[in-house]
Amino acid sequence: MKIRFSRFRFWNFCISRISTYLVSQICDRVRRCEGLLSD
């Protein structure tokens, strides 16, 4: 039970890190696209 809980926390941490990274990447691309369109 303890191992399973720690593993769940580990995956939860990894998923949150990956999702925040992906969101930042998408935001950068959207900002670049908006900049190109505004020009």
Image (cartoon, rainbow, N blue to C red):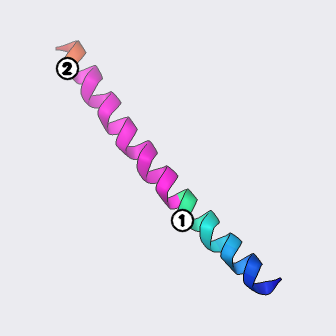
Q: Residue at x 23, y 14 (%)?
A: 37
Q: Element type at marker 2?
A: helix
Residue 27: in magenta span = yes
Q: Which residues are magenta?
A: 17-35
Instruction: Please give the label number shown on residue 36.
Output: 2
Question: Is 7 in front, or is 35?
Answer: 7
Mark 1 lies on residue: 14
- Residue 12, position in %: x, y? 63, 64
Return the x and y of residue 36 as percentages of the image width and height: 19, 20
Q: Main secondary structure of the magenta part?
A: helix
Q: Amino acid at mark 1?
A: Cys
Residue 15: where, in percent of width, then height?
56, 59
Residue 16 placement: quadrant? bottom right
Q: Which image quadrant is residue 31 in?
A: top left
Query: Disc 1 and disc 2: Cα gap in Å?
Result: 33 Å
From what the image shows, is residue 1 above or below residue 18?
below
